[in-house]
Image: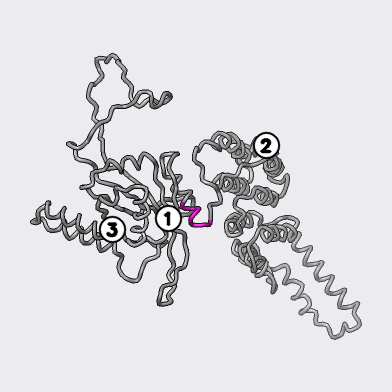
Amino acid sequence: MNCARCLLQLARCAVLQSAFCSNTHSQVNYSQLLILVLRHFHCSPAFAKSRPVPAEFVDDKDKKRDRSLTTHEDLFEQVAKEAKTKAMFNMVVDVFIKRDIRRRGHVEFIYAALKKMPEFGVERDLNIYNKLLDVFPKEVFVPRNFIQRMFNHYPRQQECGVQVLEQMENYGIMPNIETKVLLVQIFGEKSHPIRKYQRIMYWFPKFKHLNPYPVPQQLPKDPVDLARFSLTRIANDLDAKVTVYQLPHVDITANGEEITLPHIVGIQSPSQMELLAKHNPRRPVFVEGPFPLWLRKTCVYYYILRAEPAPPNEKVEEPFDPERCLYYPLQLDLDLDLDLGDEENFDVEDLDEGPVFAMCMTSQGDQATLNHWISGLQQSNPILGQVPTLFRLDTPVRELQASDDMEPGCACRNENQREESQPEEQPENRMEEELTRGQSMKQ
């Protein structure tokens, strides 16, 4: 109360002094001046508890919008309007670093950059990841004592650093010594990103060359080379021979129409040729497909030439040659003593799916194209001229070029389904019709 009275007295004195010292003191209203001064001292409790509303200028909304994640993504789109390359990505990072010395909004920018890396084609570049880590302010998020280190000092920034390392791990990029130096400068030696770095450096050298059949990062763009690589990967025999039966080209008919002919690439091993030569000519062979094969993000399709499993009365078991392979014997005769709890009989499900004689890949999986493949196989396998060939083709996939009319293979499959739906027909007549139709297809 004494302080308030003193302030009121000082206010009255200031008003009187200003009124008497001015040249126009006769025109000054003493009561009005006193009310203006006392307004600053008498305020309601509600006004004192309310928060002051800051003044907003014209450019304040633009500054707030610049701090959001959407603006960082727009920054990538604005800079890289013409082409999205590595140089453009580096330019965006340099623009952000030079815009603010305090690197405000760096976490949102790094998340946006990680999301945009596949579009710019730099998701497998180690230098780009090190440059993103360099965006963090240095020696700011380092814990100063054991309590800060124990309670996850600056968790949001550490989670962002771990996310950068996880994306490197997903793409198979191994960090280097520069990555470790940056992480130590940013988060310290006992932080979560450093532990993530140590786990990557422990496990990556162990699993780097573990796959005996690695897939290259850049697959061949030529469809013939891609088909040759895929078929070699599928085949389980190193002696298998890849044959190109037809290259993709444009043919002009007598009427002047242009017809695009697809490529046909096949593979067959010597053991498959022996099995096909021993095949019973009275039993048909089947062309089936397409079956998918994924090579990283590319999906290709292949077709097989196979036969049904032989009946039990026609199976002939050939004795194994013990000297055929010295390192991996095909038959072992071991006389082991059985214990009391051992069983002599084992329930093993043995499923015979039938032999596979050859495989091929083509960009157009219709019956005419696959007939051309069978005709090419007939030159090295003369028995195909005596064996009926039936086509079991599924519906064409998106990557395959479908004709305007219905696929002949689908029509053949519908005929087979129609025959199966008639149980009153005798199996002997059905087999004769299949043989007749298969011979007409080959002709």
- Name which residue lies at 28% across and 27% down: 319
Residue 245 is marked as 1
Q: Amino acid at mark 2?
A: Glu
Lower sequence index among marks 3 and 1: 1
Write down the region rendered in magenta: 221-227
In the depicted view, which residue is nearer to us: 184 or 436? Answer: 436
- The majority secondary structure of the magenta stretch comes to helix
Q: Secondary structure at mark 1?
A: strand
Q: In which image quadrant can residue 315 be found?
A: top left
Q: Quadrant of the C terminus?
A: bottom left
Q: Position of residue 11 (x, y in %)?
A: 80, 69
Q: Is residue 328 visible?
A: yes
Lower sequence index among marks 2 and 3: 2
Q: Amino acid at mark 3?
A: Lys
Q: Amino acid at mark 1?
A: Tyr
Mark 3 nearby-residue class (10 Å; few <14, some 14–19, many ≥20) = some
Residue 39 vertical position relative to residue 398 in the rendered view, above or below: below
Residue 442 is marked as 3
